[in-house]
Image (cartoon, grey):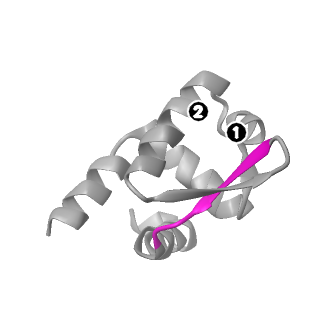
């Protein structure tokens, strides 16, 4: 139960949900591209990603100096897939 409460608390924030949906659409994306896609400042994006990473929802892969983010929680990935596939039901 605690894991679901944590997931839903993270998803309840519009900024974090926007970032997760952008990552879901991109697959893997760097902070600057993610900030542009979400319409946010780099610092806002980085701060939200730090929290999402600490909670295990996203993971990173370093490619030289660039850090790319991807979804790491399969449950959240499946949930976002449903949100994208059926927006009218929400």
- Chief SS of the magenta region: strand
- Screen quadrant of the N terminus: bottom left
Residue at the image position 42 percent from the left and 59 percent from the top: 56
- Is residue 45 depicted above or below 76 in this figure? above
- Screen quadrant of the C terminus: bottom left
Q: Which residues are magenta?
A: 66-73
Q: Which residue is mark 2?
A: 45
Lower sequence index among marks 2 and 1:
1
Residue at the image position 47 percent from the left and 43 percent from the top: 16
Q: Looking at the picture, how far across and down is residue 29, in whole percent?
A: 74, 52
Q: Examine the structure image and report whether residue 15 is included in the region drawn in magenta.
A: no
Q: Which residue is mark 1?
A: 31
Of the pair 3 and 21, the residue shown nearer to us: 3
**Residues at badges 2 and 1 in contact (C-beta under 8 Å)?**
yes
Q: Looking at the picture, how far across and down is residue 20, in whole percent?
A: 54, 53
**Callout 1: SS:** helix
Q: Residue furthest left?
A: 1
Residue at the image position 47 percent from the left and 65 percent from the top: 88
Q: Looking at the picture, how far across and down is residue 33, in whole percent?
A: 78, 40
Residue at the image position 16 percent from the left and 63 percent from the top: 2
């Amino acid at each position: 139960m605690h894991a679901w409460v944590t997931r839903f608390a993270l998803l309840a924030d519009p900024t974090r949900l926007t970032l997760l949906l952008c990552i879901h659409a991109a697959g893997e994306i760097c902070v600057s591209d993610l900030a542009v896609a979400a319409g946010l400042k780099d610092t806002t994006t980085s701060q939200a990603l730090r929290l999402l990473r600490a909670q295990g929802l996203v993971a990173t892969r370093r490619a030289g100096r660039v850090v790319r983010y991807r979804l790491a929680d399969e449950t959240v990935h499946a949930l976002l897939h449903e949100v994208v596939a059926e927006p009218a039901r929400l």
